[in-house]
Image (cartoon, helix red, strand yellow):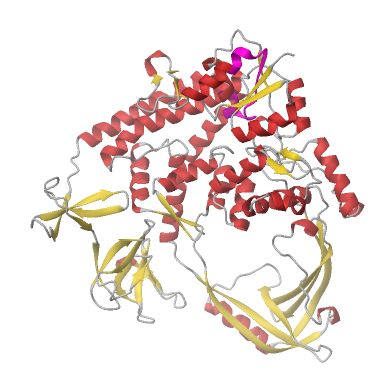
Amino acid sequence: MAKNLVIVESPAKAKTIKKFLGTGYEVIASNGHVRDLPKSQLGIDVDNDFEPKYITIRGKGDVLAALRKEVKKADKIYLATDPDREGEAISYHLSKTLKLENKNFKRITFNEITKNAVKNSIKAARDIDMNLVDAQQARRVLDRLVGYKISPVLWAKIKRGLSAGRVQSVALKLVCDREKEINEFIPEEYFTIEASLGADKLKKDILFKFSGNGKQKEEIVSREALEEIIKDINDNEFIIKSVKESERHKKSPLPFTTSTMQQDASTKLNFATSKTMRIAQQLYEGINIKGRGTIGLITYLRTDSIRISEEASSAASKYISENYGEAYLANEHKTDKSGKKIQDAHEAIRPTDITLSPTKVKEQLTRDQFRLYQLIYNRFLASQMAGAVYSIKTVKAVAGNSEFHASASKVAFDGFLAVYNIDNEKSENVVGINDLNEGDVLKLTAHEVKQHFTQPPTRYTEALLVKTLEELGIGRPSTYAPTISTIIARRYITKENKKLYVTELGEAVNQSMEQAFPVIVDVNFTANMESLLDKIGDGEIDWKVVVRNFYPDLDIAVRNAEAELESITIADEVSDEVCDVCGRNMVIKYGPHGKFLACPGFPDCKFTKPFFEKIGVKCPSCGDEIVIKMTKKGRRYFGCMSAPECDFMSWARPSGTKCPECGSYMVERGNKLNCSKQDCGYTCDKKTE
């Protein structure tokens, strides 16, 4: 019998596939890439048209020896790495490292690890797609050039051990820009009015909300406008202007892409993007299901497509009809209207077998595997179901020139909400609203004015950052999680209660990148580069043309940055603090967690202690100095020098000015001063301090 060898990336994947193919096939894992650019040098021959210099990855000797042994015994070899650019590149490097040029070898791909999918992929075996290999190679070379050329500049400017990246630097800039927006945000006051209206025929008053002047929706942003509305409702009767019934249709959601899966897993399950991808990989590679053996439960997890195969769609339709009824079937196919490039014509992420409901496989899954599988399963099922329908009743009442409204809604048809009501949407019943008719006169029994302040832009979470990167066209499904993991690991940003904050180190790195390498951190440039990589993958552009056009500008920017740094001597700042050991004046150093004090006598004297930078403002609680401090996770805040005896702290920079309205301390917001008490809201220009 002829012997066939199938090479995959992971042992788990190998184990699953082996059970499908039987005795005529040997399945072995390469454990990812087997060769790469060297870590100790650039690894790209810039003078020889950017030819990459690949070497065998350290520690892969035993794996390659085992692979070569099996290759010698095989009559036919199938390279079955993942169905994306990275997988195509791994197959290419395997073919080179194992010297398969004179062997009978083919490339196979499958979007799901099921018996049918694997066997069908062997029937459709093909040659390695060099366009996809070149696209991955271009990304690798560009990222290496950026990282290895710019990082030394950051070492000279700030500290050793820092890194820059083509995508990570843009992600960091997005978080820094958002931090700046928040810090400079000036809250603006506005009001809302609710009126309790009653009538003899009503058993209970109905709450109406102010909605405008009858011609357009209006927000109450001044006390003068507020007084006019209050005068209207006190001096006039409320008359029902209109009673309208309508329907609101809510479309079923699209099936998951990598990005939307990461976002939902973050918001609904509180998973970090890296954790989501790790668990999804386990579900994709195979789980031992009782009575079914080891099978992949979901399709390939790195995709930006929402396409669903006809086979999967038909199976879902049959399942929905049998379990929910014909009325729950979607009457149209979902399409992605964004016009974006869909990578490799993948499918969306979905369960491989719709009959394997989460409850059926729960016992074989860990808690986290079950929760993610349930999310993926229900999202896919919902995407194939009809939309939900709401019956809405809206009543508008006018008093003078002021219009108020009340509305009630009920779910007329739940549709996809039967399986995917994650926002817990339900009917909103308003007692008595059905008794109101046009022309009815209502009496004002009470009204409530609420003061509000506009809120700054929300801080990024991992989910929101992934969504923003995707919308801007930066990165691809395989890069979101490692990009975020890198800037967190480097301590450029920190995560607290799911929100991302810039550290002092991150601010310094971003500032250096903006000054010396504005093109690298330019959102449009990075998005355009992703588009060029897609064109390489489609065979429209040669990969070296892209690198040739990119490198000269990078080289000039690096040379200019190096020249400027050489002309500046960055000396340690001498402080007033005296070394406890040798009595010398200590200097301010920059470490991975921010600034600290060190003895200038190092290495003879190694004494260090925390550095607290005074801001020249007295503590409003005890009168001691306010200093800049850092949380354990590297986020900056302002605290009292006398801590822990004094517990004063502020995220915003305190000012020496007191609020003339309430007497509380003021904080700096851009070029403005704001009262620290949110319910006061007093604001003035910083120059009046």
Tell whether position 74 is magenta: yes
Which residue sits at x=71%, y=34%? 113
Front residue of 326 and 275: 275
Q: Residue furthest bottom?
A: 200
| Residue with the most extreme left position | 583
Q: Quarter of the image holding residue 203?
A: bottom right
Vertical order, 79 against 16 (above or below): above
Residue 454: tell me if it is visible.
Answer: yes
Residue 257 shown left or right of residue 567 in the figure? right
652 relative to 536, above or below: below
Q: Position of residue 416 (x, y in %)?
A: 79, 55
* The stretch drawn in magenta includes residue 270: no
Q: Which residue is the extreme one toward the top?
A: 102
Percent of width and height locating residue 364: 70, 49
Front residue of 621 and 645? 645
Is residue 395 toward the left or the right of residue 175 in the image? right
On the rendered image, what quadrant is the N terminus found in?
top right
Name the residue nearer the viewer: 154 or 488.
488
Q: Position of residue 609 (x, y in %)?
A: 21, 58
Q: Quadrant of residue 209?
A: bottom right
* Left or right of residue 2, residue 457 in this image: left
Residue 63 placement (x, y as % from top left):
52, 24
The quarter in which the C terminus is drawn is bottom left
Q: Residue at x 33, y 73 (%)?
A: 648
Question: How many numbered discs, if any?
Answer: 0
> In the visual, does 296 lie left or right of 326?
left
Who is closer to the viewer here, 51 or 237?
51
**Highlighted range, magenta:** 70-89
Residue 331 appears in view: no
Q: Is residue 620 above or below residue 419?
A: below
